[in-house]
Amino acid sequence: MSTRRKSQFLKVVIVILISLVVQGACYSVLWAKDNAIVWRMNCSYAPQGYIADAFNYFADEVERRSNGDLVVEVYYNSSLGFPNTACLTSLKKNKVELSEIQGGSMDSEEPMGAVINLPLLHNNMEEAIDWQINQYAPVLNQTIASKWKSNIISCVSLPAPIEFFSKKPIRTLDDLKGEKIRCWGGIPGEALAALGANPFTITTAELYTALQRGMVSAAITSYISASECHFWEVLNYIDHIVLSNNMVFIAVNNQAFSKLSDNLKTAVINSGEATTSWAKENRLIYTEKLKNILLDGGMKEIWPESGEVEKMRLKCKPIYKKFITKICPEAEPLLRQLGALK
């Protein structure tokens, strides 16, 4: 064989070897992906927006930190068949490995979840978030672990509190008297009644029509629903009275978690903590974006007069006492520590 042909032969051999190595690497990647552990995560929210961004961030972090050995698939709009009112049951029965749980809806399963719905516990959003993450979440998690065989691994604060949105400005306790105000029943309805308003339970899907037809003259909700329902077309004011502040938690099924290797457990825990930090850092960005949609539509911001929120809070004190007496006695230390029962 000539020197030229030998050279050509060697080049062909090298190309073939490189090709085999590359193919082997590709097969290794495919093999790793095919053998990755796949977890399903239940979520009642839509697949776009702040919550979706937070949950997608969590899923990406889990995959990154586990080097692709653990994959989280988020199922939005309760597409797995588990509504947010049955999120804890789906976890306990091992139907899913992960689930969104939130205080606004899990109270039908777990009374401790309703603490977050108690009215006027906090003076502002920052105070509420700090208390919910550092005081409330650890106590709630003890209940979730013992009764629902799961654990909270992340706290995702919503981008805005539950406030009033109205046709006429609400600055004082007297401004609430006799007003027909939309709510979703439960403790928020009790709060409105205690403040002298007439609460009406109306779903988000029916809210715009109810406001347009004058069935109600105001609503309590967050910027999320307010912007989605085009409040600027039927209401005039954003009334900055922080009635309550909701938070969404990510919970993991303990049985599924126990089957993971130590490295994967660490990846899940660290991803949850990173998502909590992401939410704290990005909440205000989303808040301003959503609020500006309302302001650009023509709505105006209104703040309560001095001392009026405290008057409202005093009206709601019986709700706190009823809650720890008849609904959730184990919440009493939390509320005492907060000073709500004074």
Image (cartoon, rainbow, N blue to C red):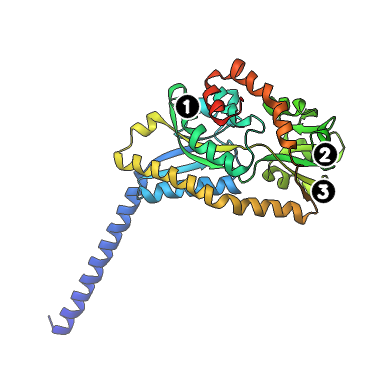
Instruction: Find residue 108 and report its horizontal and vertical position in percent.
Output: 60, 23
Q: Which residue is mark 1?
A: 144
Q: Which dot marks residue 233?
A: 3
Of the residues shown, which amino acid type is indicated by label 1? Ile
Q: Position of residue 164 (x, y in %)?
A: 74, 39
Give the farthest residue toward the right. 213
- Compared to residue 325, the image places residue 283 above or below, namely below
**Left or right: 296 in relation to 38:** right
Classify residue 129 as left or right of residue 210.
Answer: left
* C-alpha separation, residue under disc 3 versus residue under disc 2: 10 Å
Q: Amino acid at mark 2?
A: Leu
Give the spatial CA distance, label 2 vs label 1: 38 Å
Q: Mark 1 or mark 3: name the one nearer the start of the chain.
A: 1
Of the 4 image quadrants, the one containing the N terminus is bottom left
Asked whether the residues under the numbered discs 3 and 2 touch, taking CB atoms below 8 Å apart as contact, a structural biologist would say: no
Determine the residue located farthest toward the top in the rendered image.
326
Q: Return the mark for residue 211.
A: 2
Cα separation, mark 1 vs mark 3, equals 41 Å
Image check: 237 left or right of 46?
Answer: right
x then y, percent, for residue 84: 58, 31
What is the quadrant of the C terminus in the image?
top right
Specify the farthest residue to the left: 1
The mark that comes first in sequence, 3 or 2, is 2
